[in-house]
Image: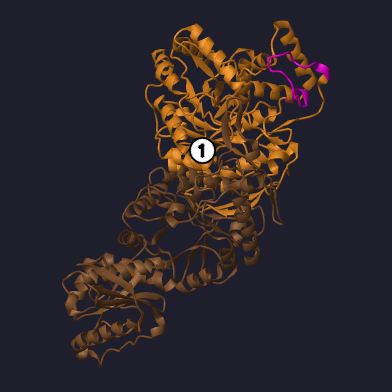
Chain colours: A brown, B orange
């Protein structure tokens, strides 16, 4: 017996007929609840795709894909009596997931009901995890039993804030790495704020020695540092971590920082981010200053490098100038992915839209907004506090609940992943619950599906 | 009478004219595994320290990037942070400029290295002032020549104030000609507090810096009257400053060549020199002394006449100025080449033989090293291997046991910190 899947349409007669059959079967199960549960009707314009299954040219079932606010749902899976107990439901589900994947959907949701244990069992066998009622079903714990499934692994990130002990900071990074985090942001404490400050790029270099999976992202101030030194530190973290590096650019406006460093007065927010953008540009030019194949070791001519593939950068702007090239050869990722953190639509937001490879957004609204405005591929991460995770009525474990919550927030934010925040024990549990199976060592760019850029200077000399 | 104990440092053979890059065993100077491998070899040899140099701009020749020597290196601090987690006893010395860093940020970076290494941080205090390096930094070449040591002292004093306040919540207030700082102490107390400070450089101002701050110096003099004069001068300066006369451990720069027989070692040294000074390197060396390009100079032919020297032209940038007296140096080279019938390449090899290397069988080299230490010409050596990252291995396997046999070198690491081992 072969199940044929074909693209159909929500209003196609056979599909309509299957829905009527489904309503006739399912509605009586919930008749006792309809005075207590708001019924959700389907707006046909929100249907993305409808599939129909046939056996021996005989239609036996249907399923649809629907955009419901920020969520993409599997909707109206139905297999007629003739097709039951022969795997048709599974084939339909695989087909609709493939349809979603082809449309770039990262996470799928569905809602079924508390009186359909067979359906719940089917989904759970098929890798769907229980989630709290979402979107239109939120608050309904009587009828709705909701599920979520990742079609691509979300990027799982966390923050380590060193407390002054180098060993504790490294231990915290190692624990997140072992739990499966894709990215660890290492905070750099304000230098004069009374907070104990270990150097974040150095912590990243040290942690590179004993971690295997997580990309290490030191947070680096662009105002009180030398662009040349920032570039060589960032490049070296990438070297030490074999391509598992990113960096978070910040712009200090703190008067205390300025007094402690003593080189200059603190800038205003707008001027600070304007300067940060200039530093980012300089760092990225320095990262490009060596082409990938600059080292040639030509014994015949005695040339160690091809000097035509190592370039001065000649950065000059109203803040500083740097001649270059970097003293560090081009690092494994070419240019180390740049993270910018946004908590409101301010000057940092503007720079994030223009220059970031990865944006860490404090809220789902900001996450959506930055993706809308950035006219290029961008990895967007959204903050999630595991303590806020709701419990699904059919939750099987707290860990699954955390993973489901992260998926829900990702969907609302249209984000590629999350940054877990809050107390470290909760973060570690959430990372462990949400992280994908371990994978082969890879660079952060590979993990994020970001192409490795060619040096901008290679184009000039080609 | 008990013997004076020898201290050993290991200079990572990365960006350095003496590093040989064209042999099959020549490894990467940028792969972090090379640094780990080298540090672990040095640690196997119970050495006091590993040393990383720094250059803040690639060398240039006649306005172009110098392409004949190993080039490209990591950020010293990030690289040493990684090595710190993969070693357990060896001191880690970072060469860092007082000119192009800011003291509070710098101090916390060295404190981070001390914390990450469990008390093994060291700082080779260097000053740089010229506009060539300054072009990579916000301030540019801002410092007048006369001010470089004064800023270095102010910088070191500020950094020391930060280190000394670690573990407290004290206010740190610094007001001088160079700095106007108000910081709150916020660093953790680290095992050493202050890192071990190293100094290199022979000027009177440099020696004053050493006596004021350093616990070790990197000396260019392996032996002879120059080494003896330098050592006795430092002892006198130390005593005058109220410090013990051995308060600074002098590590003499020492490249080496080993062989199973003395003749084999000499042949090894000769081969090393030919690999270090390629035909192209020899011509470029002549160009930088003569102050002009020689596009058709035959490296196997005679030197150009002294009359070709163009005075006052510095073709090389990004390294110590070696050609103050161009015409005099050119005349010396030509005279020697004519007397010994040397080609361009052989003349340069002769002229650039670095630091009279230690050449011989392991037992011979150990004996000579021991003699230098017992004669108080130095307290030990900064070994400069030619091959990355394995260049130290034979020394560790064959010379170290000889030194131990002679009773001049440790058989296990003593103490807890880098400073414990150095003093």
Identified at 80% across, 19% down, the residue is B327
Most common secondary structure along the magenta stretch: loop
Q: Position of residue B318 (x, y in %)?
A: 68, 34
Identified at 52% across, 17% down, the residue is B256
Judged left or right of residue A95, residue B243 is right
Judged left or right of residue B212, residue B147 is right
Residue, far front: A57
**Range of magenta residues:** B288-307
Q: Name the residue beneath numbered marker 1.
A: B195
Tell me the subunit letter for badge 1: B
Tell me the quadrant of the picture where the N terminus of chain A can be found: bottom left
Q: A26 and A96: which one is in front?
A: A96
Whether residue A406 is visible here, answered yes or no, is: no
Q: B59 and A428: which one is in front?
A: B59
Q: Is the residue B208 above or below the residue A19 in the image?
A: above
Q: A20 and B20: which one is in front?
A: A20
Q: Position of residue B276 (x, y in %)?
A: 59, 21
Residue, far bottom: A35
Q: Is the residue B74 above or below the residue A142 in the image?
A: above
Residue, far left: A85
Q: Position of residue B116 (x, y in %)?
A: 44, 43
Res. B148 image quadrant: top right
Q: Is the residue A383 above or below the residue B173 in the image?
A: below
Q: Position of residue B420 (x, y in %)?
A: 44, 31
Res. B239 image quadrant: top right
Tell me the quadrant of the picture where the C terminus of chain A can be found: top right
Judged left or right of residue A165, residue B357 is right
Whether residue A339 is visible here, answered yes or no, is: yes
* Magenta stretch contains residue B305: yes
Q: Secondary structure at mark 1?
A: loop
């Amino acid at each position: 017996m072969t199940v044929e899947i074909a693209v159909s349409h929500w209003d196609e007669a056979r599909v309509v007929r299957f829905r009527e059959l489904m309503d006739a079967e399912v509605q009586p199960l919930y008749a006792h609840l309809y005075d207590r549960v708001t019924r959700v009707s389907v707006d046909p314009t929100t249907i993305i795709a409808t599939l129909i299954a046939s056996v021996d040219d005989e239609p036996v079932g249907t399923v649809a894909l629907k955009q419901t606010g920020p969520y993409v749902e599997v909707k109206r899976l139905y297999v007629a009596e003739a097709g039951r107990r022969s795997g048709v439901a599974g084939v339909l589900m695989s087909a609709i997931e493939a349809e979603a994947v082809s449309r770039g959907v990262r996470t799928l949701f569905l809602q079924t009901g508390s009186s359909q244990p067979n359906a719940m069992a089917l989904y759970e066998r098929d890798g769907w995890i229980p989630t709290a009622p979402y979107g239109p079903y939120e608050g309904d714990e009587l009828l709705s039993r909701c599920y979520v499934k990742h079609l691509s692994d979300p990027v799982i990130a966390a923050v380590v804030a060193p407390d002054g002990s180098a060993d504790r900071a490294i231990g915290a990074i190692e624990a997140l790495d072992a739990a499966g985090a894709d990215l660890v942001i290492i905070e750099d404490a304000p230098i004069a704020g009374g907070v104990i400050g270990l150097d974040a790029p150095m912590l990243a270099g040290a942690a590179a020695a004993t971690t295997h999976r997580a990309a290490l992202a030191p947070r680096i101030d662009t105002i009180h540092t030398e662009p040349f030194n920032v570039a060589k530190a960032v490049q070296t973290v990438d070297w030490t971590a074999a391509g598992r590096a990113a960096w978070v650019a910040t712009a200090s406006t703190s008067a205390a920082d300025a007094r402690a460093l003593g080189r200059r007065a603190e800038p205003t927010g707008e001027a600070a981010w304007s300067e940060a953008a200039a530093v980012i540009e300089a760092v990225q030019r320095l990262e490009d200053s060596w082409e990938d194949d600059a080292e040639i070791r030509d014994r015949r001519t005695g040339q160690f490098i091809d000097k035509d593939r190592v370039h001065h950068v000649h950065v000059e702007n109203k803040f500083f100038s740097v001649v270059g090239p970097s003293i560090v050869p081009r690092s494994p990722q070419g240019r180390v992915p740049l993270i910018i953190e946004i908590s409101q639509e301010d000057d940092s937001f503007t720079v994030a839209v223009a220059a970031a490879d990865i944006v860490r957004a404090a809220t789902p609204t900001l996450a959506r907004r930055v993706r809308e405005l950035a006219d290029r591929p961008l990895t967007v991460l959204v903050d999630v506090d595991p303590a806020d995770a709701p419990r699904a009525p059919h939750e099987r474990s707290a860990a699954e609940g955390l993973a489901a919550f992260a998926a829900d927030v990702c969907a609302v934010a249209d984000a590629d992943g999350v940054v877990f925040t809050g107390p470290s024990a909760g973060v570690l549990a959430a990372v462990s619950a949400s992280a994908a199976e371990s994978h082969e060592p890879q660079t952060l760019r590979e993990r994020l599906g970001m192409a490795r850029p060619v040096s901008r200077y290679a184009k000039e000399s080609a | 009478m008990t013997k004076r104990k020898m201290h050993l440092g290991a200079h990572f053979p990365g960006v350095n004219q003496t590093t040989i890059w064209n042999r099959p065993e020549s490894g990467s100077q940028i792969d972090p595994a090379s640094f780990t491998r080298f540090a672990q070899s040095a640690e196997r040899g119970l050495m006091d320290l590993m040393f990383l140099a720094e250059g803040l701009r690639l060398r240039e020749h006649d306005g172009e990037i110098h392409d004949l020597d190993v080039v490209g290196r990591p950020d010293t601090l990030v690289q040493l942070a990684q090595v710190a987690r993969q070693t357990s006893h060896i001191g880690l010395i970072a060469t860092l400029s007082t000119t192009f860093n800011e003291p509070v940020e710098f101090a916390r970076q060295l404190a981070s290295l001390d914390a990450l290494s469990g008390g093994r941080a060291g700082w080779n205090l260097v000053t740089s002032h010229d506009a060539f390096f300054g072009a990579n930094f916000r301030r540019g070449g801002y410092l007048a020549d006369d001010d470089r040591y004064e800023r270095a002292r102010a910088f070191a004093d500020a950094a020391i104030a930060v280190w000394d306040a670690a573990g407290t919540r004290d206010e740190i207030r610094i007001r001088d000609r160079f700095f106007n700082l108000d910081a709150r102490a916020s660093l953790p107390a680290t095992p050493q507090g202050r890192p071990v400070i190293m100094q290199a450089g022979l000027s009177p101002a440099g020696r004053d810096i050493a006596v004021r701050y350093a616990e070790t110096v990197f000396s260019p003099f392996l032996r002879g009257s120059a080494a003896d004069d330098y050592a006795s001068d430092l002892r006198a300066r130390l005593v005058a400053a109220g410090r013990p006369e051995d308060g600074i451990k002098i590590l003499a720069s020492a490249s080496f060549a080993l062989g199973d027989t003395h003749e084999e070692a000499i042949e090894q040294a000769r081969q090393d020199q030919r690999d270090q000074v390629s035909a192209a390197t020899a011509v470029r060396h002549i160009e930088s002394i003569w102050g002009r390009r020689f596009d058709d100079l035959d490296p196997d032919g005679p030197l150009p006449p002294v009359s070709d020297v163009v005075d006052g032209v510095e073709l090389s940038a990004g390294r110590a100025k070696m050609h103050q007296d161009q015409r005099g140096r050119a005349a010396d080279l030509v005279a020697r080449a004519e007397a010994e019938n040397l080609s361009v390449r052989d003349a340069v090899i002769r002229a650039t033989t670095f630091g009279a290397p230690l050449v011989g069988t392991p037992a011979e080299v150990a004996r000579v090293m021991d003699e230098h230490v017992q004669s108080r010409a130095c307290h030990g050596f900064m070994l400069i291997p030619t091959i990355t990252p394995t260049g130290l291995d034979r020394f560790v396997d064959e010379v170290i046991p000889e030194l131990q046999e002679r009773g001049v070198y440790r058989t296990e690491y003593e103490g807890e910190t880098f400073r414990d081992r150095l003093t």
